[in-house]
Amino acid sequence: MAPRKVDGVDNNFPLGVKTVRMFPIEAIAVGEALAIDTATTTNGMMQHAKLANSADTDGRSLAFGVALEAAGAASTITPILCQVAGLNTAVRVDGTVAVDERLIAGTVDGELVDTDSILVTGSVSLAEGQQIADSAVLGVALTAAAGTGGSETCTAWLLDPLNLAD
């Protein structure tokens, strides 16, 4: 079988990891959850990443992947590598995430939370929460959150909810 090619590059990451390259529109750290910036069209529509955040109304609530490379600032020249599927051992999450929970964009830029926390906080209606839980699940936590306040991470299996890597 030929090696799987994603984004024009041989993808030899282990355990079914799939990646895409996107241009950052802001500073991004490794492990942060990303959403597609549909407002920026430089270099072509849908090629720009921003930090995912379910509290924003500008399309940030649908997380598509996790940054594998950091970006110090916005760039229309140098894209960053973003993981959309497979095992990731350093996904930035809220400190309450436990094993086997579904992960979606939280209310902190670049941070994922479990689906139940969106419903409990009252930040969205029950119907909206159910829609988020059913259609925007980025991955499943394989370990509980570990780390200190604001920098917790977990191991997660990313699911490629937007089917970007196929």
Image (cartoon, rainbow, N blue to C red):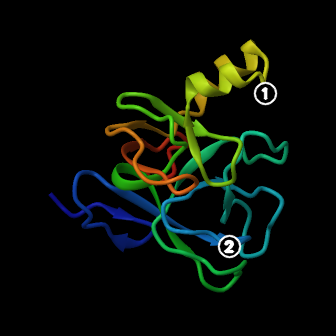
Left/right of residue 2 with respect to residue 87 in the rendered view: left
Q: Looking at the image, how many numbered discs can be counted on the residues?
A: 2
- Is 159 situated above or below 82? above
What kind of element bears circle 1?
A: loop
Pick whichever of labels 1 and 2 is earlier in the sequence.
2
Instruction: Give the x, y percent position of residue 66.
Output: 50, 56
- Is 9 situated above or below 164? below
The residue under the point 56% across, 69% down is: 29
Instruction: Give the x, y percent position of residue 125.
Output: 79, 17
* Foreground pick, 137 / 98: 98
- Residue where numbered disc 1 is placed: 123
Mark 2, Cα crowd under 10 Å, few <14 / some 14-19 / many 20+, is few
* Foreground pick, 6 / 103: 103
Residue 8 has which mark?
none
The residue under the point 28% across, 60% down is: 4
- Is 7 situated above or below 137? below
- Residue where numbered disc 2 is placed: 27
Q: Mark 1 to mark 2: distance in Å?
A: 26 Å
Tag 2: residue type?
Ala
